[in-house]
Image (cartoon, rainbow, N blue to C red):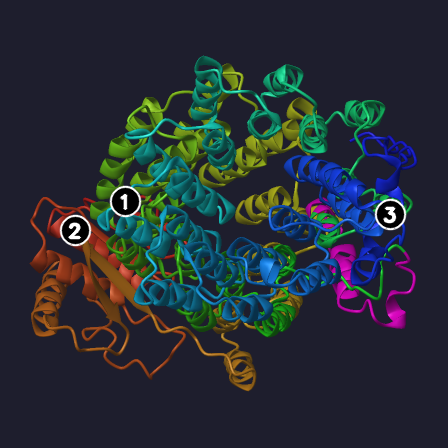
Amino acid sequence: MATTVLPSPSPPPTPRGVFSPRCSLQAPIHAHRVLDGAPQRRHAPAQRARPAAAAYAKEIGACVRARRWCAACEAFAAMRAAGASPDRFLFPQVLRACAGAGAPRLAAAAHALAAKGGPALAEDAVVGNAVIAMYAALGDVGVVRAAFASLPEPDVVAWTALVGAYANAGELDEAFELFESMQASGVQPDVISWNTLVSGFAKNGDTGAALDLFDEMRLRGVKPQISSWNCIISGCVQNARYDEALDVFLEMCETEMPDAVTIASILPVCTGLMALGIGKQLHSYVVRSGIQLNVYIGSSLIGMYSECREFAYARSVFSAIDGERNVTVWNELIQSYMNDGRMDKACEAFNLMQQDGVKPDTVTYNIFIAAYARAGQKELANELLSGMINTSLKPNVISVNALISGFYQFGLCADALEVFRYMQLLNTADAKHWTFLDNSCPIQPNSTTITSVLSLLTDLKLDRLGKQVHCYALRSGLTSNIFVSSKLVDLYGKAGDMVSAANVFQGIRNKNVVTWNSLLAAYKHNKKPEVALKLFYEMRESDLLPNLVTVQIALLSSGMTMALGYGRELHGYIQKNWPDGYPDTLASALIDMYGKCGKIEDARFVFECSGEKDVAVWNAIMSCYLLHRMPRDVKEVFKTLEQSRIQPDPVTFIILLSACKQEGSMEEARDYFYSMENLYGIKPTLKHYTCMVDIMGTAGLFKESLELIQKMPHELDACLWSTVLKTCKLHSNLEVAAKAAKSLFELEPNNTSNYMVLSNIYANNGLWDSTESVRDAMTEQGLHVERQCSWLYLGTSVDSFEAGNLSHPAFENILSTWKDVASRMEQSGYAPQDNEPYCNVEVDPLSCHHTERIAVCYGLISMCGHEPIRILKNFRMCKECHSSIKFISRDKNREILISDGCTYHHFNDGSCSCGDMW
């Protein structure tokens, strides 16, 4: 992004002469003094008071209709200074202006004036209802309740205002109880009462209850108006429940014609779902129906086209807006330029809006602050925050959130965390250099702040700090927010703390698809895909529709567990819900699933059926061939990719280098490695160097691989040291192995596999004392080897076989089958070493317990003879099991597929796809 500095805004204009001179004599901040006791002119002619009051009433009414709340309050203050008093018809408008201006002291003064006005005002139902509505708008529930109690006979308007006050405050149970009390007192709710209650539940995130109430309203014979539909659509949108909002909108269209408010409410759904097609249809409807393209619809359309990267459409909408463009529309135009990466045009629009007489607001500044923060321009972002004070604006929580989110996106994680820390220290001397913030009114973190900070801590793997933020969110009452809760599930899931992740999930009151996705992804990330699949079906039973991300997670979990039955069901679901073709994300996941389930032909079929393939789809089919040890096919696909003029990405070359390792083609690997930057402009990452080290080590070029490590422009990570350690095992290099293991123990102190590899290196070289010392070190660290387990999927059911667990109902038949296989192996000249697999798990936790052999035997007795046996294991397969299963595949004429976390083994007719190298 260009480093253009945002032009300094023009000084705030003086109040324009839209009111008579007397309107600007008193500012709203002093109005309460005028209301408490305005001096009366002793000799004022009585006959002039009425015309003056009428003029003021006309002026106040015009200001209220134009939503110029402060101007209306100024006019009212001037009216009192002139000795005129409002009547029962004007007072409700005055009270509405006080609420709109957000002036609680002025509101209290106006209320006191009404109370002093005698029975004509104090006991008037319209004035009383306006008082309740005013306090409700100001969010003062206690005063609302007191004002309501003072009414002699509350009518439906008063009850509705009271219900709305509690609903807006988030006290939904109390709002519902009051709604029931209203009916019990003999007052029947009208459509506005129902709208108020439904809207309250929808806006507070309980869309399920809102929809139930909406249905109840219709059952009780109250016909929903367009405003009824609009309030529930708006509530769903405010809580980012776009799918539900769209469903409600489509249902509404069966009986009602959308109005301007509906269109303005539903357009953000198109933005959230990136549904450009629907957005264009709505735009067409506005034009065909003659709906005025006002600032509300116009700003929503500009925002939708901008997010969908149709910038030309966005600017044409801006030009076509009827009437005067307000600051919201200008902000959308500026945001459009920002999204297009055109900072110069954004600054130009910023100047034009001021020339057009529109004063920039806090949102305008926040747009620029976010852009500068995302570009890593800290000084400019902070200067803008400071500059807001000069324009009588104050930074708000959105301003600070823009800094945190922007710094995080640019990679300035420490700066982002510092901003969050200062948000909590504004009352201390530590924050004194943040001179642009008002320490007397600190900016408190909100749910968006916490979500951004949790995302940052998750990526940095700072789970301890994440727990502290969790505690802060609990104290601040922010964990009820669905996005905060979902991010907490993600944080704990990626930290491996699935107990905490599940506890947070269970505590979420109104789970949505995002929440479920977080938990499903957490279990998949922690290598428990079978749990993710189980939860996927639980989610569907809860009447929530899976979205694209949900289906992707379920497909990847099916591939990890080799659950072909689940995968085929998901494929059918995709064909039903995406009839026009696979989205690229799902195409990649389908190819991955079929590849891991051994169905290469099906994977290729999905690849061929995909329309315009992105590079991820090409990578998926290449990975599929790589998995099945088909390196030549990998290279052929890459040649086709080049011919299709699709730019390969870094992942493509990791796959190519891995294919070269399978073939043992060192020179070809070097060619691909150097062509990355020379031909495609892709700088090799640490992963590419790790692949080269692995290839060199496997090819016997151990010394050269160490030289390459010394020349690398990257800091070594755990993955590379792990590769070095495994290479040392091949070459029995104990010195380098000890160095690599030491680095791994520092980088991954809780990873037991590193201890196991080092222990095996010492054991292979007969260093039994060193082997024991490694195992003692594991004990001292409190590390325990995960219990070995194998899973066999039969259709959509799963059987697990854990080391030491003999509780399987068919265990006796399984052992009998194994003894028969062992006998046939002996007759063929091969004697298996272990006749009783995994019965004594305590002998050596680091040795293999042959759970995969037991799973294979159960597959032989429980599956049809032509069905492939698919097994997942959480530990590397030992040579004994590998040899046994090769024999079984030939003897029983069975296709057996086993994924052991290290290698994919495809056994057929006595051989394995790994070529006995894994």
Q: Secondary structure at mark 2?
A: loop
Which residue was labeled with disc 2? Answer: 795
Question: Where in the figure is residue 788, as x and y percent of width and height?
Answer: 34, 70
Which residue was labeled with disc 1? Answer: 597
The magenta span reads 406-435
From the image, give the main secondary structure of the stretch colored magenta: helix
Crowd tier of the residue under label 3, counting other residues whose Cα lies within 10 Å: few below 14, some 14–19, many 20 or above: few
Question: Where in the figure is residue 583, as x and y percent of width and height?
Answer: 39, 30
Question: Where in the figure is residue 913, as x and y percent of width and height?
Answer: 32, 43
The kind of residue on which mark 1 rests is Cys
Query: Is 225 positioned to the left or the right of 36 in the image?
Result: left
The kind of residue on which mark 2 rests is Gly
Inspect the magenta stretch and tell me whether residue 745 lies in it: no
Between tags 3 and 1, which lies in front? 3
Q: Which mark is residue 44?
A: 3
Query: Is 214 positioned to the left or the right of 753 in the image?
Result: left
Q: Mark 2 or mark 3, which has the lower sequence index? A: 3
Res 342 → quadrant: top right
> What residue is shown at x 55% (from left), y 34% (from top)?
653
> What residue is shown at x 81% (from left), y 28% (from top)?
350
Between tags 1 and 2, which lies in front? 2
